Amino acid sequence: MAAVKGVTFYDSAYHVLAIRTNGLYLTADKAYVKRATRKGHVALLAEWDSGHSRK
């Protein structure tokens, strides 16, 4: 994650956790998603579809 500069420790830590566990880091931080998308395992919360429909 050293290649992604200008991010908080918390964003980096949760993102690394998602990568190592083959999970997904959801965040509302558009700037972080833009910088870190190429690493994978990250998505913008506002665009995330959980696969469950809301009624």
Image (cartoon, rainbow, N blue to C red):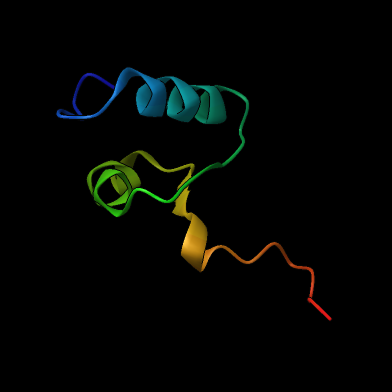
* Residue 11 point in image, percent of width and height: 38, 29
In the picture as drawn, the residue positioned furthest to the bottom comes out as: 55
Q: Quadrant of the N terminus?
A: top left
Residue 51, by quadrant, is bottom right
Number of numbered discs overlaid on the protein picture: 0
In the picture as drawn, the residue positioned furthest to the right comes out as: 55
Would residue 33 be found to the left or right of residue 13 on screen?
A: left
Tell me what residue is drawn at x 42 percent, y 43 percent: 40
* Residue 50 point in image, percent of width and height: 70, 62
Q: Nearer the viewer, residue 40 or 51?
A: 51
Tell me what residue is drawn at x 40 percent, y 22 percent: 10
Answer above or below: position of 4 versus 13: below
* Residue 13 point in image, percent of width and height: 43, 19
Q: Quadrant of the C terminus?
A: bottom right
Answer above or below: position of 51 versus 27: below
Would residue 13 be found to the left or right of residue 23 on screen?
A: left
Answer above or below: position of 37 versus 54: above
Q: Nearer the viewer, residue 28 or 23?
A: 28
Residue 39, by quadrant, is top left
Q: Nearer the viewer, residue 26 or 18?
A: 26
Tell me what residue is drawn at x 45 percent, y 30 percent: 15
Tell me what residue is drawn at x 24 percent, y 29 percent: 7
